Amino acid sequence: MKRVLLATIAAMALSMMTLAVEAADLPMAPSYSPPPAPAIVRQVYNWTGFYVGVNGGYGSGSQNPFNIITDRFDNFSTNLSGGAFGGTLGAQIQAAHVVMGLEADLDWADIKGSTVANPTIAGVPQGLVNATTNIDWENTVRARVGYASDNWLFYGTGGLALLGAKSSLTAVAGGNCGSIIVGCSATNRQAGLVLGAGIEYGFTESISAKLEYLYITAASLEVSQHGEIRAGLNYRFGGM
């Protein structure tokens, strides 16, 4: 009986060893790996399009109050300063990092100054007057060329300027202005040039804000020149 039991145990052990060897030879089930996530394509900011906007800022410089009325007087200038506010219209196109376009603006202005002076003609004094002069509107048409770094745009600008200038003279100590000069006030349009540079940032695909400096000279440096620091907000439409 004991021999039969030992033989049975030995047979069972041999059978289990055989099953273990066969299981080891079976191929392993492949491990599961999820499919790769789709690559995220980063959107590149595009400055191409037509745009409209508003702008406003502060300017200071100098202007000849007498030349606005007549060119008979010798060169003279008085300081002037004040604000400007208006609208902007433009279009631009981007190629790689380069952005090129045209921009025009028309601004109401209140850039003014006054002084007591003794105007001269060929060096001969004409009598004391209180001279007030101002720029009450300005219009520029400019090219813009810039470098785009995603949402940032760094640019230079330059073109033509047209200013609406005004002067009025009042004789000091109650005198009659007409006894000093024929015509005590006048308005004049002054044509000139504008140069500047700025930086613009795009908050959304359509909305951007800018900060720029413009130097505007009309007719000549002796007649009118001033610099402006402007801020602006633009809304850009679809690509060109």
Image (spheres, rainbow, N blue to C red):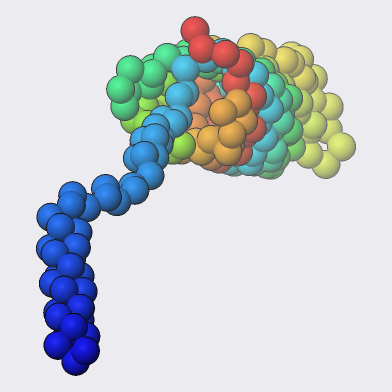
Residue closest to the eye, 15 or 91 = 15
Q: Residue, x 14% and y 64% (percent of image)?
A: 18
* Residue 225 in picture, x, y percent from top left: 51, 30
Residue 114 visible to an observer of this rendering: yes
The image shows residue 184, relative to residue 63, as above or below, that is: above
Q: Residue, x 64% and y 38% (percent of image)?
A: 57
The image shows residue 125, relative to residue 23, as above or below, that is: above
* Quarter of image, res 116: top right
Report the side of 58 relative to 143 (left or right): right
Residue closest to the eye, 29 or 53 = 29
| Residue with the most extreme bottom position | 2
Residue closest to the eye, 112 or 117 = 112
Residue 66 visible to an observer of this rendering: no
The image shows residue 161, relative to residue 195, as above or below, that is: above
Q: Residue, x 62% and y 30% (percent of image)?
A: 207
Q: Residue, x 34% and y 30% (percent of image)?
A: 147
* Quarter of image, res 99: top left
| Residue with the most extreme right position | 174
* Residue 80 in picture, x, y percent from top left: 63, 39
